[in-house]
Image (cartoon, rainbow, N blue to C red):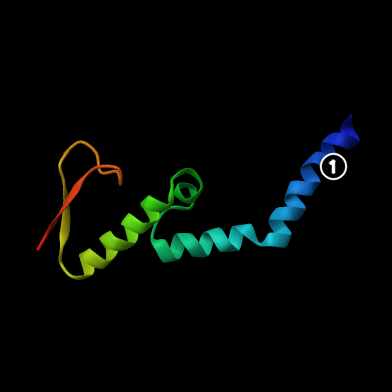
Amino acid sequence: MASYCIKDTVLPLRLVTRLALVPGLVEMARVTGVLLNHLLSRGQQYKVFSQIARAARKLSRVFISSQHHTLTPSVNYTYIM
């Protein structure tokens, strides 16, 4: 039983190492400006919205939420010029 458990954990570790998943995720988090755990738990829309918000911030623009209690990408936002 113990040898099976060891083999069962070694294979995913080899895959993560060979595919360089951790460096790729760290780089994606840096480029998109989101936290590393959000890359794993949220969708593509979150990363895209983060990049749009970052570009808007550089242009001194803001997004105003129609719901003041949350700021998630699923909320409808209005672009203010």
The location of residue 12, given as percent across then percent down, is 74, 47
The location of residue 76, given as percent across then percent down, is 21, 45
> Which residue appears farthest toward the top when viewing the image?
1
Residues 36 and 81: in front is 81
Q: Is residue 41 above or below residue 55?
A: above
Q: Is residue 78 above or below residue 56?
A: above
Residues 64 and 13: in front is 64
Mark 1 residue crowding within 10 angstroms, few (<14) / some (14–19) / many (20+): few
Lateral position of residue 72 relative to residue 47, left or right: left
Q: Is residue 65 above or below residue 81?
A: above
> Which residue appears farthest toward the left when viewing the image?
81
**Displayed quadrant of residue 30:** bottom left
Determine the residue positioned at 77% across, 42% down. 9
Q: Is residue 7 above or below residue 14?
A: above
Q: Quadrant of the N terminus?
A: top right
The location of residue 42, given as percent across then percent down, is 44, 45
Count of residue discs = 1
Lateral position of residue 27 relative to residue 50, left or right: right
Q: Which residue is mark 1?
A: 7
Label 1 element class:
helix
The location of residue 23, given as percent across then percent down, is 59, 63
Q: Quadrant of the C terminus?
A: bottom left
Determine the residue positioned at 38% across, 60% down. 33
* Residue type beneath disc 1: Lys
Determine the residue positioned at 28% across, 63% down. 54
**Displayed quadrant of residue 65:** top left
